[in-house]
Image (spheres, rainbow, N blue to C red):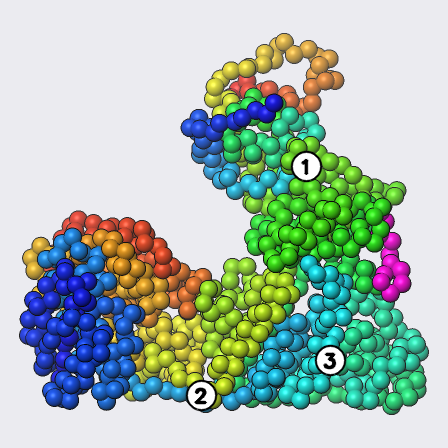
Amino acid sequence: MSEVIHIGKEENELLAKVEEISGEIVTLCEQCGICTTSCPMADDMDFTPAAIMHAVKTGDKAVLDSKAIWICASCFTCTVRCPRGIDLAKVTEALRQIHLRKNKDHINLEEVKEEELEEDLPPIAIVSALRKFTG
Amino acid sequence: MTRIGVYVCHCGGNISDTVNVEEVAQFASKLPDVVVVRSISHMCSESGQKAIMDDVREYKLDRIVVAACSPQFQGSTFEKTLIKAGLNPSMVEMANIREQSAWPHYKTPENATEKAKVLTAMAVERIRKTKPVEREAIKIGKNVLVIGGGIAGIQASLDLANAGFNVFLVEEKPTIGGHMAQLSRTFPTEDCASCILAPKMADVADHPNIHLLTYTEILDIYGSVGNFKVRLKQKPRYVDPDRCTACGECEKVCPVSVPDEFNLGMTARKAIYLPSPTAVPHAHVIDENACLGIVPLRCGLCEQACEANAINYDDTPKYINLDIDTIIVATGFEIFDVRKKPQYGYGRFQNVITALELERLIVEAAEGHFIRPIGKDIAFIQCVGSRDKQVGNLYCSRICCMYATKLASLLKRADPSRDVYIFYTDLRAYGKGFEEYYRKAQELGVKFIRGRPGELQEDPETKKVIVRVEDTLTRKIIEKKFDLVVLSVGLVPSKGTLKIAEMLKLPRSSDGFLKEAHPKFRPVDTPVEGVFVAGTAQGPKDIPDTVAQASAAAARAMAIMNRGELELSPIKAIVYEEKCDGCGECIEACPVDAIKLNGKASINAAICKGCGACISSCPRDAIDLKIFSNDEIMAEIEAALKDKKEGEHRILVFADDMCTYTLADGVGTAKLNYPSDIFIIRVPSSSRITPKMMIKAFELGADAIFLGECEEAVSPYSGTLKVIKENVEKARKALEEAGIEGGRIQYSSFVTVMFPKFVNIANRLHEIATKNEISEDKRRRLHKIEVVE
């Protein structure tokens, strides 16, 4: 069964908010996907960079709870390659900001086990976790 | 002493339902030099025109004012009436009381009547200052220069030559044919490109009216329409094309091999070579940079092999001077330099090639085998160098979707076991037969995948190219190794296009290609009179569009040359020689290079477009326009501000004829309302309004001033917006010195459909003008302020 998405006021608010925080025009995105295969982390993302852009455009709030926005390494490769000249790194940062401003989902650093630090957790995840903690 | 007749038109109620025309007529009868006033139902009708002709005879009128509709609407009608009445056609002025008063102010009839009076007074005062202008015509011969020997230049040359004109076709390469000669087949019909092109190339060589000048570069071009002086340099071929039979014996003995540019360096040629299999002229040429024989040591092998005695090592460049009447620029394109996108590995990965290289591979394969292996798994990547802000090309190159579809189809049809993919963002199959052709490719099994790869990698062992791309329809990342990746490269203006643009002062649009005189109605004219553009020099396009445009450019050139003379627009700049001290400031200001300094400034009327941007640059007030002269404009300004009553406001809008004035007419016609204290003064370009004029207007009572100009993209002039900005800044500074807000002067650019923008600006100007009053003291202070120009 297909899911029908109704785009209304709330969905448009997400787009407006992201555009306000990032200063970028997200509706410029033409969904070419160059960002995705330029992204070194894309394979680990639940939303590809292009999917993030599309979600913002259509106001799909699931993107706010995605792992992808925290997996983003802010390496800016998407930004320097976007043929529409959109600064995707800023858009992703805006999504993180929206999340952080809700002030939830903190990580207790003391609970992170040493062996997890050495093996499972990629450094970028720890950086993200600290951002969340201080945000 | 002048004798003026004023005619107030009812326009069958269009005007008289709102404006009290009798009151306007009564008012006009008291204006200076007015001898006769009539109010007539339809001025443009035969009886209206007859009234003018009769009055000219009876009252010995020498000037006419028609208070009726827009001069853009009926101006030429009354010019003809004046000619019939034996007067110079410049001696009529229209007061636009319909579009600028009766219609936009229909809700306030009293204001409309008052404004109509002022508009009529402005026209009367202006016509008092008008001097008769003789229309100049220049002789035009039948010599046309076609620059560029691609399909555009070939088509234009043949059309012109068949119509009996004298064509000089100049091509910098040793053969004509251009890029089309390199192609395999043409979409969507799949004709063999060189098979359909070769007969046309042969026709060019044989045509008695075409002087073909290959291997020739343009050194410089001076002058203007009907009188272009062109200097050419024909490089030495070292082979007499009349004797050479292209037998190829010379090639066999030549010891030097260099990359063959016709095959984009994928094969080798000798130092003596035939530039292409269908070259015209069909003769060999010696590459002087590669040949051993020219200097200093003689090799001489080819000379010995040549039975036709065609080789001449002592050949020298020839310098040719031409007198030319019109020019067609058909300088074509180059493909985007893919090395600017290093993430696609072109030049580093041996199996990444451009689509043009694949064209050559397919042609060469038709004559035998592939000159390099292409394999079974083949990918095309679209939009390389197009639609890409990162490389500065925002435009779509228009042909890549279809040529990739064509190349993919050819490969798939030749060997159905090939797996062929096209990675695209938006597939544009807009032309005749394109959509059907796209469908055919899909039927053949070509896979169109919606996604653009971020980068390519090479498998170090197999040298296969790894493509990773997001299928944006499924959000899955596809990864596949390909034997060959073809980059569908975009088009950029050729070096020749840039060179000729600079030489002829042709403006370019933001995409870098040549700009048309008007994007809709003059698509093959350049803003330089007598110079036309055809083919990809104007922008990316396919072969049918190129041919259509070339024929259009040829027809436009014929239209000028056929008449034998060209009547120049009477709106031209003139220099008052007694005032000019030869400082040369105006030369810099002229956007079209029409001014030369021979001790004093002199203006080439054939080049001058009459914008008036030079006027404000002259420190000695020595430049003027023949029509729209300083005296005429000042008379209008004074009349617009005269008799301003206590509590009234006056806003002057200077409207360029092509965009802002047309827009204002449109706003009136749509019966959109704006404040009636706005008075519109028609000018060729607002750049002719000097800071001094603006300051004078404030001194005389203006409360706000607005300068409207065409948007750069549609403007008949280029560079006038810059002049307007500078003039406004100078005038604002002077205003502020006198304690008046600089913001009372505004400017903006328009196209003719921006109705809401016009109304918004008019309302804002009214606000600016009425917010505070300018004291008489401050206005007097302006009198003493020197405006630096």
Q: Is residue B708 above or below residue B441?
A: below
Q: Is residue B706 left or right of residue B481?
A: left
How far apart in space, not on screen, are marks 2 and 1 (Cα)?
62 Å
Residue B31 % position (x, y): 9, 75
Quarter location, residue B102: bottom left
Which callout, 2 or 3, points at the residue further toward the start of the chain? 3
State the quadrant of the N terminus of chain B: bottom left
Magenta region, residue range: B365-376
Report the chain holding disc 2.
B
Residue at image coords 46%, 87%: B563
* Amino acid type, callout 3: Ala
- Label 3 sits on a secondary structure element that is helix
* Amino acid type, callout 1: Glu
Q: In the rendered image, is residue B711 in sight?
A: yes
Q: Is residue A45 above or below residue B714?
A: above
Q: Is residue B489 left or right of residue B328?
A: right
State the quadrant of the C terminus of chain B: bottom left
Give the labeled residue for mark 3: B202
Q: Is residue B23 left or right of residue A119?
A: left
Report the chain holding disc 3.
B
